[in-house]
Amino acid sequence: MSIYISGIGVSKGIAIGEAFVLAREQPDATQLTLPAGEINAEIKRFKKALAQANQQLHDIKNKIAKNTADDIIVFIDTHLLMLEDPAFNEGTISNIKEHSCNAEWALQMQGERLVQVFNEMEDPYLRTRKDDVLHVVKRIQSCLTGQEQISTGDDIYRGKIVVADDLTPADTIMMQHQKVAGFITEFGGPLSHTAILAKNLGIPAIVGLHHARQLIRRNETLVIDGFTGVVINSPDKKSLRYYRAVRRDDISKRNLLNDLSGKPAVTLDNRQITLHGNIDRPEDIRLIKKYDNTGIGLYRTEMLFIELNQWPDQKTHFKTYKRIIKALKGKPLTIRTMDLGADKEIQDTIAHGPMAHNPAMGLRAIRRCLKEPQDFMPQLLAILRASALGPVRIMIPMLTNIEEVDQVLALVEEAKQILRDKKVAFDEKVPVGAMIEVPAAALAADAFAKKLDFLSIGTNDLIQYTLAIDRIDDEVNYLFNPLHPAVLKLIHMTIEAGKKAGIPVSMCGEMASDTQYTRLLLGMGLEYFSVQANALLEIKHIIVNSTYKNLQSEVQSILQVYDNSEIKSRVQQLVNLL
Ligand code: PEP
Ligand code: MG
């Protein structure tokens, strides 16, 4: 009998294969008290386990194909670095000495301490780094207890669907090398490293399927649907036939999408659309290039602040921008000035004063920069200097009042004068633009457009502020609705304001990355999309199969509708045209 179970689909695609259930037990980390005479021997045992874990990771690194991308190998390197990190090994050794205890427990304590540090981070991506700590702790503990790690030997995973409690990045990479068909894990969420890696490696994967190892037996046939998160255990003939057809369609669609890489995003009626990518770090350029050789419409520089845990100096800013510009080889780069505050915060600034009661509406982004212009100036100077190396635009987040626009422009002029006086090269015509992500800015977009060189719609915040819902609060997630008529009106007003002033308007919020809305946005007159790397080709596929002109009148009439289900169904009809 077929059984349907579901988890979280994190890597799209269909996999069909036999289950390979990894029945690993948690290593025993019970606390044992040791006599004083055994402490040195325990430390030695811990160091031996460290060396063994190090060897295992190097073995995996040596086994994977030489052409494996650097952004994949970096996951293993992170674990290797952790093994050498004093916070990890010295910390554990101190625990052994201080508590006269066994290495397993000392390591467990140290791991928990480090996990706590990551848990307290506001940024959801950085929070997932605690997974690395847990994976490294587990690897060393397995070495200590002599427990078997995942085999790196023969081709035992070829064509199989691996069902595990959790997989480390190293496991995932090694299994992909052996041509595993798919993964199911009991733990992990969409932001876990296994999920990100599976997506990058193109392996269908489902995470967060609790008790999967009890529900699935070894060698049972499984279908995993990475689109919906559904797993079918022992599928009947009819389901198998259906999923084989879906898999065939998916593969041919992917091939079709790959063919679009490097091609222009032009509609059927010859309207040229700009399609750029969003990045958070310089390393993300590789991912963009993996899909499409295009420019960057949003570089979120605050990640630089968060990773350094302080405001970077001009040199650090410049070095980072130079690296990106070099990698882009002449393609345009939009650098967004720092957007700290709300869910993105650093210790240094928290230390400056009490946490705001409502940080999303507090001294966030440009508000903070304008309050402390001496701290903002190094970033502006660095962006201007970078503009001499390639096409760069300066984008300001969270602008709300026209006075802020004037202040920003005055600061940019001041920075330019400093460089002129020092005879440092920069682009005199570097475009300065605003993110339109506060409803007030959208309503006043006409005035903004008169003073600025471009606008970019940040739907993540625009929706949050328009609908009064915290974008990271799960409780109100159900109210996050890009199709709310008020949101659509604000987007439309912004696009129209840009057109009237003759300046480009882009969209870099998540709405631009969602294929459900591409035709709606084209119909609103949007001609510049900046999207997540893995959405580039799917969005381009829709653009090249759309007729820009025909969409205008249809969308004009959708904009008159206030009933949400009608808007939804009419937007769906646009999608179905394909
Ligand atoms: C947005 O608000 O839509 C946006 C792109 O900025 P961020 O997600 O970084 O706030
Ligand atoms: Mg924003």
Image: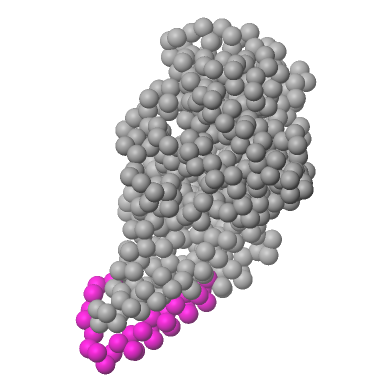
Q: How is the image coloured?
A: one colour
Q: Position of residue 517 (x, y in %)?
A: 56, 24
Q: In this picture, is 86 found above or below 267? A: below
Q: Is residue 216 left or right of residue 413?
A: left
Q: Position of residue 238 (x, y in %)?
A: 48, 35
Which quadrant holds the N terminus?
top left
Outermost residue toward the bottom?
37
Outermost residue toward the front?
421
Q: Residue at image x 39%, y 86%?
A: 44
In the rendered structure, does residue 251 fall within the stretch colored magenta? no
Q: Residue at image x 53%, y 10%?
A: 559
Which quadrant holds the C terminus?
top right
In terms of secondary structure, what is the magenta stretch mainly? Answer: helix
Q: Is residue 254 left or right of residue 355?
A: right
Q: Which residues are magenta?
A: 29-57
Is residue 182 shown to the viewer in this render? no
Q: Is residue 16 left or right of residue 451?
A: left
Q: Position of residue 369 (x, y in %)?
A: 51, 40
In the rendered structure, does residue 53 fall within the stretch colored magenta? yes
Residue 539 falls in image quadrant:
top right
State how many labels appear: 0
Q: Residue at image x 40%, y 32%?
A: 361
Q: Position of residue 436 (x, y in %)?
A: 55, 26
122 and 271: which is toward the camera: 122
Q: In this picture, is 209 found above or below 74? A: above
506 and 170: which is toward the camera: 506
